[in-house]
Image (cartoon, rainbow, N blue to C red):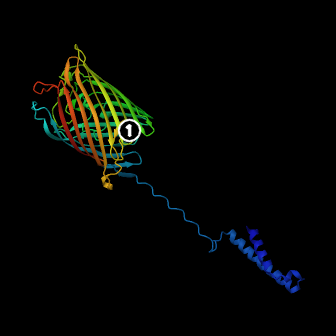
């Protein structure tokens, strides 16, 4: 750099000299003047070299360096997001979220005039008022507590803690016993105001126990050992059950598929000497049962279930079947059956959600809060329950059902259901006739957070 600078200055000086200096011999005075000019140039070069060695600041014409961008602010240690309710999270694994739901139902049940029962006609109720909370703890731990306040007494539902390590999840406490697709899907997200008839008829409830789940790709394995519901636990209750479920849920193109099966065996124990299976006419607010088995002496019960479903865009379908056998000492063991088939279609550009082997809440694409019309869905279902076998006559119910669901925004939903229920061997006679039809209409307003 230094030599280049000196050469440039000397060359500039030489070309600035008069051309006559090279055309003829110089005089003594001219030679002295040239030597003086060269000496002056040498001094200037030395001064410039000195400035370069000392890192002199650039001249005014040199562009100033671009300042480095300010570092991005670090995220807050605690974050709060709204998902129907505030969800609090920290970077080290803590989280907390209150949860709840309110479901207000109204219904009308019409039966043949020969049947006089105060449960017929109009009825209404607070179907569910649930409050609770859940969250996570560093190290892979989690928790959930939820209770229902709709009845006169507070009923504890979920009360559990979990541990998750990759695909493995362990749960201890009161929780569902892996009965089937619709039973495990939240009541917030079902296609009808109540689940298929067999789910209540065969006493699918939460029980205290320990379970494990393993998920890898499209495969989900679930199994556990359970005792009884918290409300029935005491020092004399020695009943227990083994419950398991397998789900294979591949996605083929744009279609989500679901195939599953479950198995259940329950030892009733000394404090539960009998079992009884029965069901209401679709709506829960009408306290009447047209199909019901008698109380049966029993030692154990065994159940097997199958399930299948698909979701493709706005269309979905689902089918389930369940066989429930009762081990009666010294008597024939009856096997009862229930099942349902349904199909649903969104009239708007929405789709049903699915995750972890169950149906989930939908996310409205055009909510009314953004000027849209919300999500509109229609569903059809055939529902069957047979409580006749091995000398037990509990009746048979065939339900033909339709539902209309409007979800204006996430977390809010309105439902209207209609069911035509045909009964054979009904336990409530209509003037001596046990084969007749019943009409049931139900409506629900729901908010979830």
Residue 242 image position (x, y, % from top left): 32, 25
The reply, left or right, for residue 164 in relation to residue 392 is right
- Near mark 1 (Cα within 10 A), the count class, few <14, some 14-19 or many ≥20, is many
Image position, residue 292 (x, y; %):
18, 26
Element class at badge 1: strand
In the figure, residue 163 lies in which quadrant? top left
Q: Nearer the viewer, residue 187 or 330?
A: 187
Q: Residue 97, relative to residue 310: is it above or below?
A: below
Residue 419 lies in what quarter of the image? top left
Q: In the shown orientation, is residue 154 left or right of residue 256? A: left
Residue sitting at 58 percent across and 67 percent down?
65
Asked if 416 appears above or below 366 in the picture, the reply is above
Task: Decide if residue 159 is in sight here.
Answer: yes
Which residue bears the numbered disc 1? 311
Pick the quarter of the image with the N terminus: bottom right
Q: Please report the residue visible at 19 percent of the width from the left and 41 percent of the height from the top.
A: 150
Given residues 75 and 384, the one toward you in this image is 384
Viewer-proximal residue among 366 and 3: 366
The one of 34 and 12 positioned closer to us in this rendering:
12
Residue that lies at the very extreme toward the right in this rendered image: 25
Residue that extends furthest to the top in the rendered view of this protein: 330
Q: Residue at x 13, y 35 (%)?
A: 120
Residue 320 placement (x, y as % from top left): 32, 30
Q: Going by the image, does 237 lie left or right of 30?
A: left
Q: Is residue 278 above or below residue 443?
A: above
Residue 174 can be seen, yes or no: no
The residue depicted at 25 percent of the width and 33 percent of the height is 400
Q: Is residue 368 above or below residue 276?
A: below
């Amino acid at each position: 750099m230094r030599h280049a600078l000196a050469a440039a200055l000397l060359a500039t000086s030489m070309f600035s000299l008069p051309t006559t200096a090279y055309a003829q011999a110089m005089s003594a005075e001219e030679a002295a003047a040239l030597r003086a000019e060269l000496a002056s140039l040498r001094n200037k070069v030395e001064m410039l070299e000195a400035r370069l060695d000392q890192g002199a600041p650039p001249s005014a014409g040199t562009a100033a360096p671009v300042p480095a961008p300010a570092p991005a602010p670090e995220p807050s240690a605690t974050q709060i997001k709204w998902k129907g309710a505030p969800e609090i999270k920290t970077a080290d694994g803590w989280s907390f979220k209150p949860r709840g739901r309110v479901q207000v139902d109204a219904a009308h049940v019409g039966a043949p005039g020969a049947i006089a029962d105060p449960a017929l006609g109009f009825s209404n109720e607070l179907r569910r008022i649930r409050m609770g909370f859940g969250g996570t703890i560093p190290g892979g731990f989690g928790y959930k507590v939820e209770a229902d306040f709709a009845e006169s007494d507070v009923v504890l539902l979920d009360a559990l803690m979990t541990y998750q390590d990759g695909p493995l999840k362990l749960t201890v406490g009161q929780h569902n016993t892996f009965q089937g697709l619709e039973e495990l899907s939240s009541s917030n997200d079902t296609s009808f105001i109540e689940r298929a008839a067999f789910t209540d008829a065969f006493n699918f409830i939460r029980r205290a126990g320990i379970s494990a789940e393993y998920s890898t790709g499209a495969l989900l394995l679930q199994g556990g050992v359970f005792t009884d519901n918290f409300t029935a636990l005491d020092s004399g209750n020695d009943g227990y059950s083994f419950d398991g479920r397998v789900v294979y849920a591949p996605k083929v193109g744009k279609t989500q598929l679901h195939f599953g099966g479950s198995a259940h065996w329950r030892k009733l124990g000394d404090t539960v000497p009998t079992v009884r299976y029965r069901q209401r006419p679709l709506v829960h607010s009408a306290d009447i049962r047209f199909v019901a088995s008698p109380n049966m002496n029993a030692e154990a019960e065994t159940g097997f279930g199958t399930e299948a479903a698909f979701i493709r865009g706005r269309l979905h379908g689902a089918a389930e079947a369940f066989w429930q056998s009762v081990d009666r000492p010294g008597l024939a063991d009856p096997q009862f059956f229930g099942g349902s088939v349904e199909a649903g279609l969104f009239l708007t550009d929405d789709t049903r959600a699915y995750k972890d082997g169950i149906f989930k809440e939908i996310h409205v694409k055009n909510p009314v809060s953004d000027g849209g019309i919300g999500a509109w869905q229609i569903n059809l279902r055939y529902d069957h329950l047979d409580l006749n076998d091995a000398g037990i006559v509990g009746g048979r119910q065939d339900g033909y059902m339709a539902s209309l669901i409007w979800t204006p925004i996430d977390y809010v939903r309105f439902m209207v259901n209609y069911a035509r229920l045909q009964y054979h061997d009904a336990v409530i006679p209509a003037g001596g006739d046990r084969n007749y039809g019943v009409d049931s209409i139900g409506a629900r307003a729901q908010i979830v957070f």
